[in-house]
């Protein structure tokens, strides 16, 4: 099997990848399996892992709720807080860079999607507040 990737218009970031007997039109051959390629970029003919954001800290205070803190965010990062049960977006928070704190006061499930600018990868976190 040949591994391949389709790149974004800049020719750097992998947008999809696969494995086949031949490389499809518009794709580039790659030395890694498709499941690994999704988190990579092609820079000057070298395949590199895209940087990932640091894992956030989640604290469940004694009085209830949860506090989620992200550190080391690059400028231009956007965080979206979504109620898992309803699918409703509760907040969209642009970040100037540095740290971001989200307080979740009500019981329930939440998804926090943090989207930094390239080359960083998007980060998704599920939080359940008891």
Image (tube, rainbow, N blue to C red):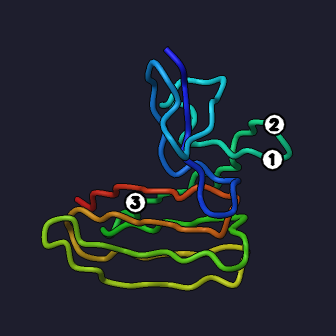
Which SS class for mark 1?
A: strand
* Residue drawn at the location 22% of the way across and 59% of the way down: 130
Q: CA distance from mark 1 to mark 3?
A: 41 Å
Q: Nearer the viewer, mark 1 or mark 3?
A: 1
Residue 14 point in image, percent of width and height = 58, 48
19 relative to 24, above or below: above
Residue 129: which numbered mark, if any?
Answer: none
Badge 1 density bin: few <14, some 14–19, many ≥20, Cα 10 Å? few
Q: Specify the farthest residue to the right.
A: 44
**Residue 30 left/right relative to 81:** right
Q: CA distance from mark 2 to mark 1?
A: 5 Å
Which SS class for mark 2?
A: strand
Residue 43: which numbered mark, if any?
Answer: 1
Dots 2 and 1: beta carbons under 8 Å?
A: yes
Residue 60: which numbered mark, if any?
Answer: 3
- State which tag comes first along the sequence, 1 or 3: 1
Q: Mark 2 sits on what residue?
A: 46
* Residue drawn at the location 62% of the way across and 38% of the way down: 28
- State which tag comes first along the sequence, 3 or 2: 2
Residue 41 point in image, percent of width and height = 69, 46
């Amino acid at each position: 099997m040949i591994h391949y990737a389709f790149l974004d218009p800049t020719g750097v970031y992998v947008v999809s990848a696969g494995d086949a007997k031949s490389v499809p039109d518009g794709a580039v051959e790659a030395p890694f399996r498709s499941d690994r390629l999704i988190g990579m970029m092609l820079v000057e003919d070298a395949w590199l892992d895209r940087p990932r954001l640091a894992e956030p800290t989640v604290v469940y205070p004694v009085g209830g709720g949860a506090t989620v803190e992200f550190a080391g965010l690059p400028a231009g990062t956007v965080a979206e807080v979504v109620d898992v049960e309803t699918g409703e977006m509760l907040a969209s928070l642009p970040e100037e860079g540095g740290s971001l704190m989200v307080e979740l006061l009500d019981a329930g499930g939440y998804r926090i999607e943090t989207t930094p600018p390239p080359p960083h990868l998007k980060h998704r976190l599920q939080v359940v507040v008891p």
